[in-house]
């Protein structure tokens, strides 16, 4: 995969713009279009594209909650229910306080 520096990307955009009479606005617009097309092509292959942030949060909360005995876990914004209570290890005896 080729990696572009800012200068080479601007040079590529200028080359795509073509004639000498084109303004900076045209060059900039074409560069942005080029950048968007490259981003659209590689976005599907990035790992964060497939990661569910809520599932990751629950997983990390469960790991930290059960990492040691008798931990106090504060669920800020927890409301009536806590999303990661189901991951509570009874042998670790964590205490969950929803605020």
Image (cartoon, rainbow, N blue to C red):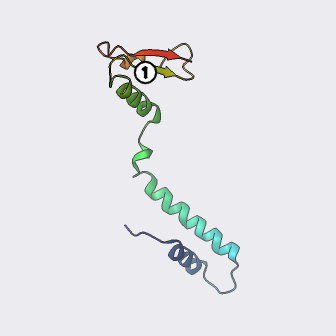
- Viewer-closest of 74 and 40: 74
In this picture, is 61 found above or below 33? above
Disc 1 on helix, strand or loop?
A: loop
- Viewer-closest of 79 and 67: 67
Q: Residue at x 52, y 73 (%)?
A: 9
Point out the image quarter for the N terminus: bottom left
1 relative to 82 in the view: left or right: left
- Viewer-closest of 65 and 28: 65
Residue 83 position within the rendered picture, expressed as x and y whole percent measured from the top left = 46, 20
Q: Residue at x 55, y 60 (%)?
A: 36
The quadrant in which residue 18 appears is: bottom right
Residue 35 position within the rendered picture, expressed as x and y whole percent measured from the top left = 54, 64
Q: Residue at x 68, y 81 (%)?
A: 22
13 relative to 44 in the view: left or right: right
Residue 21 position within the rendered picture, expressed as x and y whole percent measured from the top left = 70, 85
50 relative to 97 in the view: left or right: left
29 relative to 6 in the view: left or right: right
Question: How dense is the environment of label 1, judged by Cα within 10 Å: few (below 14), some, or many (20 and up)?
Answer: some
Considering every residue shown, the one lying at the far bottom of the view is 20
Residue 46 position within the rendered picture, expressed as x and y whole percent measured from the top left = 41, 51
The quadrant in which residue 90 appears is: top left
**Residue under pointer 1:** 84
In this picture, is 20 found above or below 34? below
């Amino acid at each position: 995969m080729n990696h572009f520096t800012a200068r080479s990307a601007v040079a590529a955009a200028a080359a795509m713009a073509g004639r000498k009479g084109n303004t900076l606005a045209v060059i900039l617009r074409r560069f942005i279009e080029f950048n968007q097309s490259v981003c659209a092509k590689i976005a599907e292959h990035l790992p964060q594209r497939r990661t569910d942030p809520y599932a990751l949060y629950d997983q990390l909360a469960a790991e930290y909650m059960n990492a040691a005995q008798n931990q106090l876990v504060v669920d800020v914004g927890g409301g009536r229910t806590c999303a990661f209570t189901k991951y509570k290890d009874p042998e670790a005896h964590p205490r969950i306080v929803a605020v």
